Image (spheres, rainbow, N blue to C red):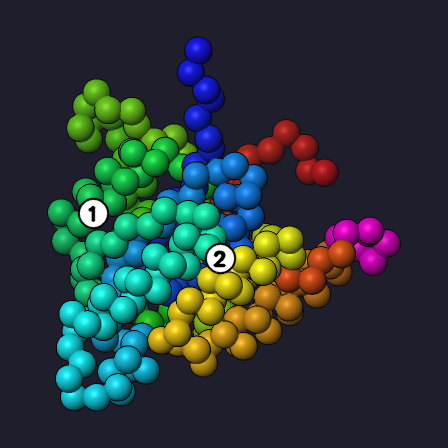
Amino acid sequence: MSATPNKTALVVSAHSADFVWRAGGAIALHARQGYDVHIVCLSFGERGESAKMWRKGPGMTEEIVKAGRRQEAEAAAEVLGATVEFFDIGDYPMRADTETLFRLADVFRRVQPEFVLSHSLKDPYNYDHPLATHLAQEARIIAQAEGYKPGEKIVGAPPVYSFEPHQPEQCEWKPDVLLDITEVWDKKYAAIQCMAGQEHLWEYYTRVALQRGVQAKRNIGITSKKDIVYAEGYQSIFPRVTENLG
């Protein structure tokens, strides 16, 4: 008798570090709970998010930067307990054609995720981020369609959550889920430290996690015995279907 397969989750990250800053805790937490978490990095962030590498000298090339970013992301994914693949569709600007859309739909079919994490639907500071989410949303719809590659197992209706953008107020992002990541903060911070090319963000996202931890603690009540220190915020795109409101 075959073993019951693990539950799965899919993270669609615009650049090779986004999944670490914004969803590293969720990835590590669900991996610890037995989920198979798979990450798709649409781009290495080789142009717009690799300034430290480009400043190393005139001998730096885009291929060298990509290789460095890949190494960082693979190391971070391993720390978090996830698998990762790279589409390498470029950044600044990022553009996705129909082939890329179908490629991502095929990932949805293969992974069969219980839930999906991606970026906010708006981000005036970085157009690559909402593009990634819209691509993930459309791929999800295609993967649900019986007429796309008939005979394959379709995807159900996995909930989609937008992780926290760098400046949420400007992105019209408002969290309705606060996820306690205290027990896996060491994993997330270790993954953060893999991102040597963006060391200036290490402290920033530590502060974000602490702030969301304070809010999470407040929302479960001061009498709760649960000691929440670190948390991540998420905004659900679709309504939650439930049998009770407890």
User: Residue 11: percent from the left, percent from the top?
Assistant: 39, 50
Residue 56 appears in the figure: yes
Closer to the N terminus: mark 2 or mark 1? 2
x, y percent for residue 201: 46, 76
**The stretch drawn in magenta includes residue 145:** no
Magenta region, residue range: 220-226
Report, in whole angstroms, how far the alpha carbon at label 2 lies from the one at label 1: 25 Å
Q: Which quadrant is home to the C terminus?
A: top right
The residue pinned by badge 2 equals 24
Is residue 22 among what the camera can see?
Answer: no
Whether residue 78 is situated above or below residue 201 in the rendered picture: above
Q: Residue at x 26, y 86 (%)?
A: 56
Residue 211: x and y in percent read: 64, 69
Q: Residue at x 51, y 63 (%)?
A: 190
Q: Looking at the image, which is closer to me, 53 or 108?
A: 53
Compared across the picture, whether 109 is left or right of 21 comes to left
Q: Residue at x 68, y 33 (%)?
A: 244
Q: Nearer the viewer, mark 2 or mark 1?
A: 2
